[in-house]
Amino acid sequence: MILQLLFIFFARVIDVSLGTIRMILVIRGEKVPAAIIGFFEIMVYTVALGMVVSALSDPVKLLAFCSGFAFGVLVGSVIEEKLALGYRGIQVTIDREQADLIKELREEGLAVTCWEASGKMGPKLVLSIIVKRNMAGVVADKIADRAPDAFIVLMEPKHFQGGYIKKK
């Protein structure tokens, strides 16, 4: 009985974690890897569900099933965060007087596109930067340290082509 409960729990952790990764791949347009993961996700789910549906009078199995789902959401989120798949767009608005930040970022190898804008408090520069997702936090923190009043927005582009960054 304990082995069945553990199996149900861990099967749900696995299938929900796979589901999290699958959804992220679908959103990013990576259809084939998403389909492969989906195959294994639904296989594990169906086996676990079968063990619970055949014993609906046993609330402990249902509890293991639901607990595995909840824990799977947490595990899937952690895995997705560690994988840091894809790219992030960083849009930064700074005061015109901080234009030297653009040169610093470019010297660090970042592709920075900028244009002039006008804000409530005067002339601004808007910077557009695309980086690998695992670098987005580091770059945003560096900008915030250098320009504490900067308005920084992180975005997740689904598709892009051309430009300085080459997708791999």
Image: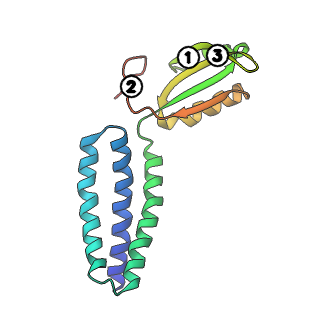
Secondary structure, mark 3, is strand
Q: Position of residue 6 (x, y in %)?
A: 37, 76
Say the numbered circle drawn on residue 106.
1
| Mark 1 residue type | Arg
Q: Quadrant of the C terminus?
A: top left
Earlier sequence position, callout 1 versus callout 3: 1
Q: Nearer the viewer, residue 111 or 152?
A: 152
Nearest-to-viewer mark from 1 and 3? 3
Q: Amino acid at mark 3?
A: Leu
Q: Nearer the viewer, residue 146 or 114?
A: 114
Q: Which residue is mark 2?
A: 160
Task: For marks 1 and 3, give the CA distance.
Answer: 15 Å
Q: Which residue matches tag 3? A: 125
Mark positioned earlier in the residue sequence (1 or 2): 1
Q: Position of residue 93 (x, y in %)?
A: 64, 23
Q: Residue at x 36, y 27 (%)?
A: 167
Q: Is residue 94 left or right of residue 155?
A: right
Evaluate if marks 2 and 3 touch, with contact meaning CB atoms under 8 Å apart. Answer: no
Q: Amino acid at mark 2?
A: Phe
Identified at 62% across, 30% down, the residue is 152
- Closer to the chain start, of discs 2 and 3, is 3
Above or below, comparing residue 77 to residue 119 in the picture: below
Mark 1 element type: helix
Q: Residue furthest front?
A: 120
- Which image quadrant is residue 41 in? bottom left
35 or 100, which is in the foreground? 35
Residue displayed at 42% across by 62% down: 72
Q: Is residue 107 left or right of residue 159?
A: right
Q: Position of residue 163 (x, y in %)?
A: 41, 16
Quadrant housing residue 84: top left
| Residue 108 position (above or below residue 10) | above
Q: Residue furthest right?
A: 121
